Image (cartoon, rainbow, N blue to C red):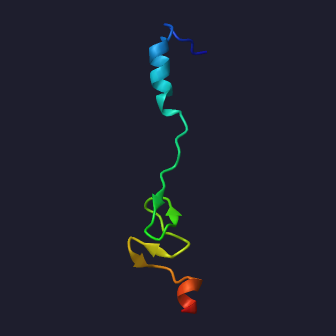
């Protein structure tokens, strides 16, 4: 069975745990006010990087 030879200090323990925290997701607010995650398609409008990628119901009705 593996047993540590030396006690891990509080500083080393906390440095190891520094990446374990939960972070809030990044949010991008579009010009029309819709919200999306970065580098992802806006499913409400069907626009990605300024181009219409998916035709949605609003554009089909017009």
Q: Splitting the image into 4 quarters, where does residue 2 fall?
A: top right
Q: Quadrant of the N terminus?
A: top right
The image shows residue 45, relative to residue 37, as above or below, that is below
Looking at this view, name the residue that lies furthest to the bottom. Answer: 62
The image shows residue 55, relative to residue 41, as above or below, that is below
Q: How many marks?
A: 0
The image shows residue 44, relative to residue 5, as above or below, that is below
Q: Residue at horizontal 49%, vertical 21%? A: 14
Q: Quadrant of the C terminus?
A: bottom right
Query: What percent of the width, then of the height, locates residue 49?
Result: 38, 70
Tell which of 19 and 56 is nearer to you.
56
Looking at this view, name the residue that lies furthest to the left. Answer: 50
Q: Residue at horizontal 55%, vertical 90%? A: 60
Query: What percent of the width, then of the height, locates residue 22?
Result: 55, 38
Query: What percent of the width, then of the height, locates residue 17?
Result: 51, 26
The image shows residue 14, relative to residue 3, as above or below, that is below
Query: What percent of the width, then of the height, locates residue 55?
Result: 52, 84
Tell which of 13 and 33 is nearer to you.
33
Q: Residue at horizontal 50%, vertical 76%? A: 46
Q: Residue at horizontal 43%, vertical 68%? A: 31
């Amino acid at each position: 069975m593996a047993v540590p030879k030396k006690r891990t200090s509080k500083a080393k323990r906390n440095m190891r745990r520094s990446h374990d925290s939960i972070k809030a997701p990044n949010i991008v607010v579009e010009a029309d006010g819709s919200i999306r995650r970065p580098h992802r398609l806006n499913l409400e409008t069907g626009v990605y990087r300024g181009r219409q990628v998916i035709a949605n119901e609003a554009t089909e009705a017009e």
